[in-house]
Amino acid sequence: MKKFFLSSSVSELKGVGTKKLPLLNEIGIYTFSDLLYYFPRRYLDRNFTKDTFLKSGDKVTLLATVKESYLAHGKKSRLVVNVKTNRGEIISLVFFQGIQYFRNILKKGLELVVSGKLDYFNGYQIIHPDVEILLEEGEENLLHAGRIIPLYPSSDPLSKAGLDSRGFRRLVSQVLDFIKNGDLEIPEVLPKDILEKRNLLFRNIALCEIHFPTNEEELGKAKFRLSYEELFFFSLLLEYKKNLRESVRRVLWALPYSVSAEKVLSNLPFTLTEDQNKALEILKELSKKDKPFSALLQGDVGSGKTIVALLFALHYIDNQVQVCFVSPTEILAKQHYTTILNFLGNQPFIGVDLLVGKEKEKIKKEKLAQLKSANTMLVVGTHSLMQPDVEFSDLGLVIVDEQHKFGVEQREMIRSKGKNPDILAMTATPIPRTLCLTLYGDLNLITIPTKPSNRKPIKTYWFTEDKREAMYKSMRKYLMQKRQAYIVYPIIEESEKLDLESCIAGYENIKQNIFPDFSVGLLHGKMKTHEKDFIMEKFKKNEIQILVTTTVVEVGVDIPNATILVIESADRFGLSQLHQLRGRVGRGEFESHCILMTKQFVTEDAQVRLNAMVEHNDGFLLSEIDLNLRGPGELLGIRQSGLPDFKLANLVNDKQIIEMAREDAKGRSLNELDKLEIKTRFEEGKILFTN
Ligand code: ADP
Ligand code: MG
C-alpha cells in the first residue's frame, strides 16, 4: 500500500481534481494536515432511532426507501413522499416548500436517511424532514448517517463544486481510513508525561474522533485534547519568548535625560496630560532595566500616544541608538513623519526619514545607506521596513503603531533587525484586561485612560434611511461653517467589488446631487499611492471638504477640522472598527458628530453594536462589549493581536485548559522537547509566534 504523510497533498484523495483543488487551496487546505485540522463546525446526531414504538412528537432518524410521491392540493399545495423504513413503518414526508426540487430528487426506490419530528395524522408523517440520500455509487452508508456526523463550514462556491458537508465527509473519511489502515502515521507531538498527567487522547485518535465521533463523550475528549494541544504550544512559545526577552540588552543606558526630548517638550503647542506624563515615566523606568522589554501602550483614539512615543524615542536617539516607527498604512506613516517633523520644529536636529512602498531605486538606495550608517536615527515607515534590504546600524527600539493591524511574524521580522531591541506597541483597540492577563502575563501594559481636556465629546447618532434628507441638511450647516466631513463605506473582502462600486456610486451621488456646491473627494484602497497622497493632501488643506472613502482612513488619520463622520451601512462594521472610525473626528476644538446610517431593519447583533456606539464613548468599555459579542476569536483574530488563529481553543471559555497548558509549559524550553516533534508541528504551520 502507498504510504502517506501529513504533508501529502489533498490532490492524492479520490474526488479531488482540477475543480476542487483550487477551491480547497483557497480556504487554506493544501495537505492532509490542513484537512484534518479543518474541524467540523457542529455535529448532527444521526444515530438511527432504536425505540421499538414510535409516537407523535418523537425526534427520529430512520433509514427508509421511497415508495411513491404525489402532489396534494388542499388549502396549500404540498408534495407528499411516502417512504417505508427499514423497520417496516410507512411515513409520509410532507413538503410545502421546494416542491419541484424534492419531487425531482426523491425518486422511487431511493434510499434515504430521514430525520425530523414525527406527527401522527392519518398515519405517521414528518413535515419538512431533513433528508439525506444514501448509497451514491460505492459509498459507505455510515459516512452520512447512523452515527454522529460532522457538518463542515462551507460556502456557496464550495457547495456548488461538491464541497458541502457531504463532500468534506468523503474527503476526511479517506484520510481517516489511511490512519486506521496504518498508511498514514500521525506523529504524537505532546510530551508523554503530559499525555499521562492530563489524561489526553493520542493525537491520531483525537483527530479521528473530532471528525467522526464514536459518541458525545469521545468527542468531548477529542476537543479537549486538540484545544489543549493548541494552547500548550502557544504557551510554550510564550515561555520561549519570555526567555528570549530575558536575554541581556546591549543598550547601555547612559542618558536617562534627553536633550532632544526637552527641546521638543519646550516647543509643544500644548502641555502633556498627566496620563501622558505617567506613561512616559513608566517607559523610562522600563528602559533602565538590564533586560529588553515589550510594552503595550493602550490609549483610546485621540489620547495622544504619538507624542509619548516620540519623546521616548528621543531618549534612545540621544543615546546613539536607532528607532523605527512602523505604521500599518502609507497614509498613516506619512502623517506620522510630518507630525514628527513638526514636533521637531521642522528643522530636524536628528536624522529622520520616511520609508514607504515603492520609491525610486536610487532614492531608496540612498535612504537605506543613510539608515545603515546611522545617519538616519529615526525611520518612519510601513511594511516596507520589514524587507530584507532594510538594515540598521544599531536598532534599539521598535515602535509599532496600531499594533493590532500587524501579524506577529511581521513584528518579529522588524524586531530581528536589531539585537534584542525594546518593543513599544501601541493600540487603540485595547485587549480586554481579563484576556490580557492570561495571555500576556509578562507584557508591560501601559494605559492612557483619559484624553486631552480640550476635546469636545463626539455626539453619535444612529439614523435609518428615512432620516437621510434631514441628515444632509444638518451636514450642510456645518459644511457652511467650513468644517469637513468623512463619508465612509464598508468594504468587506467577500464582496469587495460590489462594495467598491457602491462607494464610488455614493461619491458620484454626493458630488452631483447632494453637495454639488462643495468640493468632494474620493479615496479608496485600490487607488494608486500618488493619487491617495494627492487627495489626502487636499483634504488636509481643506481644499476637499467632503471625503468619500472606505476604511483606509480607519486608523490614526488626524485632521482636527474634520468634525462630521457619516458611516454608511454601519451595521456591517464590527464594534471596535466603528469606534476606531469614530476616532477620525473629535480631534480638535470643535464639536463633532458621528452618524451611523443603516437601512430600516438590522440584525439584533447589529442593534447591540449600534446602540453601544450611541451610548458609549469609552473604547475600553466598547472592547469588552465587543468581546462578549464576538468572542475573542474574531476580536483577536490573528492579524488583530498577534494571537494565533486558534482553530478550536476558545480563549474565553477554555480558561481552565489555558491554565493547565501554561502550567505545563512553564520551565520547559523548546529544546527540552524532542526537536523532531516540534519541527513537525512547525512544518505543519500550526505554530505561530506571538509577543
Ligand atoms: P492617538 O493616541 O489616537 O494616536 P494622536 O497621537 O494622533 O492620538 O493624538 C491626537 C491629537 O492630539 C494630535 O493632533 C496630537 O497632536 C494632539 N495631542 C496630543 N497630546 C495632546 C495634549 N496633551 N493636549 C492637546 N493635544 C494633544
Ligand atoms: Mg495614533
Image (spheres, grey):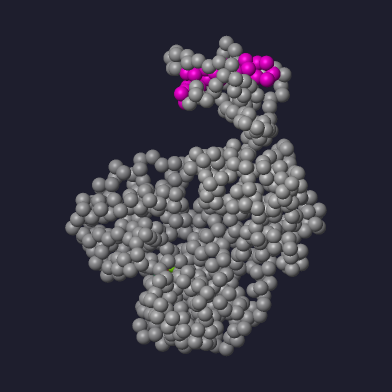
Q: Main secondary structure of the magenta part?
A: strand
Judging depth in this view, the residue of 119 and 103 nearest the camera is 103
The answer to whether residue 215 is above or below residue 34 is above
Residue 312 appears in the figure: no
- In the rendering, at what x and y percent does residue 425 appear? 53, 69
- The magenta span reads 78-100
From the viewer's side, name the closer residue of 196 and 500: 500
Instruction: State left or right for residue 407 relative to residue 680.
Output: left
| Residue in the image at 53% along x and 16% along y | 69
**Residue 91 at what x, y percent from top left?**
60, 17
* Residue at 63% over, 29% down: 135
The stretch drawn in magenta includes residue 154? no
Instruction: For the C terminus, give its image quadrant.
Output: bottom right
Q: Taking 674 as reference, is 631 above or below it?
A: above
Q: Nearer the viewer, residue 575 or 679?
A: 679
Q: Position of residue 682 (x, y in %)?
A: 66, 61
Q: Residue at x 52, y 80 (%)?
A: 391
